[in-house]
Image (cartoon, grey):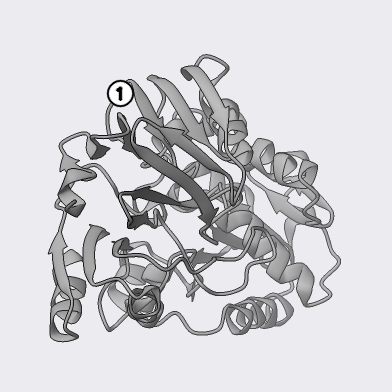
């Protein structure tokens, strides 16, 4: 059996013919396997959705109770059989509840990574390497220029700036699911015990993280504080709000942006960011290439990002490789989240 007899790229996303399901489909389908809760992977309107409990909960928080006709929670390490395919979920280390999806049939194993990172993150289960014949990898930061470095060092840079400018507020643009909570946890790791302020759009998801036993310390909504109280503080907000009227309620704000894209100075200038923080929830170039090699896969399918460079690397290292060229995935740090943007004004 060939890999193409098990999985096939289609305009709606990767489709498992023998199992009758799509993985992270870009449009409504009868049965969807969802790797994680970010809006470019987890969409409403499917017939049946299979995902981790956390991903199902996050989809419900964002889309409401009727986001799918039926749902099924799958635990890490649990195997379910669908048609002629055996499907197992493994931790992806991207955000809370994120999973890689392994499909096995006739002695062949294909692993779809979804989004992943291999560095330690206190807010989600660590990435688990899964040996496979075919590895479908993301490539958001699939260029050699992207080497993220040490996230703790970026947080230290933020806290030095807070100490240096006690009369200014620090606004940190961070994606509302995963990045914001990871930044909070990294700040707390340093011993910082002051309240961290949040834009209202981040409250629901952050409280859900707390309900899953993730300690993020004391946080408050920025709208409840007056301008003077916000001097010398840290506030997390969706990146799009850094340029909006909302930011004017803060005293002489220092604009920060926590993203892997901040490695590129032109991106920081484009977003008018004063203090770029290179913190990413995606694997960087070294993480991507090391993971591909470690899986032992002889065939690599590349999607979601800088596909051609990673295909070229794979081929030069003796692997078969191809880009999937599926339209509909985008980096959430760069594009924002349409499911939240419509509510930002009401929540601010």
Which residue is located at x 69 percent, y 65 percent? 122
Q: Quadrant of residue 188?
A: bottom right
Assign the C terminus to one quadrant of the image: top right
Is residue 312 shown left or right of residue 161? left
User: On the image, which quarter does residue 298 sit in?
Assistant: bottom left
Q: Is residue 30 above or below residue 147?
A: above
Task: Report the front residue among 157 and 94.
Answer: 94
85 vs 2, left or right, is right
Q: Using a 10 Å C-alpha cutoff, classify the residue at mark 1 as few (fewer than 14 neighbours), some (14 to 19) or many (20 or more).
A: some
The picture places residue 238, in percent across and down from the top left corner, at 51, 48
Please state the horizontal and vertical placement of residue 169, each as a whole percent of the image: 66, 63
According to the image, label 1 marks what residue? 29
The residue at 22%/61% (across/down) is: 301
User: Which residue is more in the foreground, 107 or 193?
Assistant: 107
Give me the residue at 30% from left, 71% from top: 297
Residue 71 seen in render: yes
The spot of residue 7 in percent (x, y) is 23, 45
Q: Position of residue 255 (x, y in %)?
A: 52, 64
């Amino acid at each position: 059996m060939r890999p193409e007899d098990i999985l096939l790229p289609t305009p709606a996303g990767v489709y498992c013919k023998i199992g009758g399901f799509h993985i992270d489909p870009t449009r409504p389908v009868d049965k969807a396997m969802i790797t994680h809760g970010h809006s470019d992977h987890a969409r409403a309107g499917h017939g049946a959705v299979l995902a981790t409990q956390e991903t199902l909960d996050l989809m419900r928080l964002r889309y409401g109770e009727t986001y799918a006709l039926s749902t099924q929670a799958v635990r890490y390490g649990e195997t379910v059989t669908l048609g002629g395919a055996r499907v197992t979920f493994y931790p992806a280390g991207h955000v809370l509840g994120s999973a890689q999806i392994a499909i096995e049939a006739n002695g062949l194993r294909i692993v779809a990574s979804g989004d992943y990172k291999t560095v330690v993150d206190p807010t989600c289960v660590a990435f688990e390497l899964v040996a496979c014949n075919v590895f479908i990898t993301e490539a958001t930061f699939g260029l050699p220029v992207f080497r993220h470095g040490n996230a703790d060092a970026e947080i230290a840079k933020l806290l030095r700036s807070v100490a240096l400018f006690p009369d200014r507020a620090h606004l940190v643009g961070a994606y509302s699911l995963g990045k914001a909570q990871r930044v909070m946890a990294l700040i707390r790791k340093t011993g910082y015990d002051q309240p961290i302020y949040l834009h209202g759009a981040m409250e629901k998801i952050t409280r859900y993280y707390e309900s899953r036993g993730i300690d993020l310390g004391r946080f408050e909504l920025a709208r409840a504080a007056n301008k003077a109280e916000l001097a010398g503080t840290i506030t997390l907000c969706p990146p799009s709000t850094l340029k909006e009227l909302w930011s004017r309620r803060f005293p002489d704000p220092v604009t920060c942006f926590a993203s892997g894209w901040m490695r590129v100075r032109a991106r920081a200038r484009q977003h008018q960011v004063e203090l770029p923080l290179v913190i990413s929830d995606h694997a960087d170039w070294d993480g991507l290439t090391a993971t591909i090699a470690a899986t032992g896969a002889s065939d690599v399918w590349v999607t979601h990002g800088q596909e051609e460079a990673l295909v070229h690397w794979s081929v030069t290292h003796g692997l078969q490789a191809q880009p999937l060229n599926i339209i509909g995935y985008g980096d959430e740090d760069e594009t924002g989240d349409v499911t939240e943007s419509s509510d930002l004004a009401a929540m601010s």
